[in-house]
Image: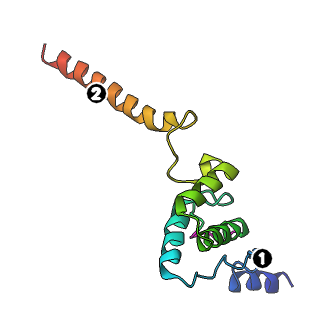
């Protein structure tokens, strides 16, 4: 009996995973331009369940629900920026791979510059000591 269950799990991967019941989760929009805009936006949004995949690539039910929201809002005439803003307001900056510059996200932009400047100062000091 254990062997049969193991073989079934191997033969049907993902059979135990839930699938989103949202109608537009896996159905493309009829308008090719709207679908292209929705697809581009879905590539920029992070799956909150998987956290390492975009909602376009994830099979998680949460990602399916988010794909449905993106497609239905774009089909209703909202721009991708408006949909992104709505999702960020609802789920926070973490939902997007391209967070905006504000009080909460400024370290994401400032710290790399600070580290590069610090590395430059250390490099100049070390090279200066060698010349002596």
Asked whether 131 falls inside the magenta stretch, the response is no
Which residue shows up at 65% across the image and 60% down it?
Answer: 50
Disc assigned to residue 120: 2
Q: Quadrant of residue 96?
A: bottom right
How was the colour assigned to the protein in this rendering? Answer: rainbow
Residue drawn at 30 percent across, 22 percent down: 122
Q: Nearer the viewer, residue 122 or 52?
A: 52
Can residue 59 be found in the magenta stretch? yes
> Range of the magenta residues?
56-60
Q: Mark 1 = which residue?
A: 16
At x 54%, y 63%, the residue is 79
Estimate the x, y position of residue 123 in percent, counting from the top left: 26, 25
Q: Is residue 37 above or below residue 88?
A: below
**Mark sitting on residue 3:** none
The quarter of the picture where the N terminus appears is bottom right
| Type of secondary structure dominating the magenta stretch | loop
Instruction: Tell me where residue 30 sits by quadrant.
Output: bottom right
**Residue 70 at what x, y percent from top left?**
62, 67
Kindly state the secondary structure of the residue where label 2 is placed. Answer: helix
N-terminal-most mark, 2 or 1: 1
Question: Which of these two is toward me, 74 or 27?
Answer: 74
Q: CA distance from mark 2 to mark 1?
A: 52 Å
In the image, taking residue 130 as reference, residue 58 lies left or right, namely: right
Please give the name of the residue rendered at 49% of the width and 38% of the height, measured from the top-left corner.
Answer: 108
């Amino acid at each position: 009996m254990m062997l049969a269950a193991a073989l079934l799990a191997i033969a049907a991967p993902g059979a135990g995973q839930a699938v989103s019941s949202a109608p537009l989760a896996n159905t493309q929009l009829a308008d090719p331009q709207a679908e292209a805009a929705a697809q581009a936006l879905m590539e920029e949004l992070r799956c909150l369940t998987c956290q390492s995949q975009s909602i376009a690539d994830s099979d998680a039910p949460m990602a399916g629900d988010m794909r449905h929201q993106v497609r239905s809002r774009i089909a209703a005439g909202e721009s991708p920026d408006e949909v992104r803003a709505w999702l960020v307001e609802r789920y926070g900056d973490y939902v997007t791979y391209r967070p905006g510059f504000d009080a909460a996200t400024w370290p994401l932009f400032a710290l790399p510059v600070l580290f590069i400047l610090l590395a430059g100062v250390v490099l100049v000091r070390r090279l200066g000591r060698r010349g002596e």
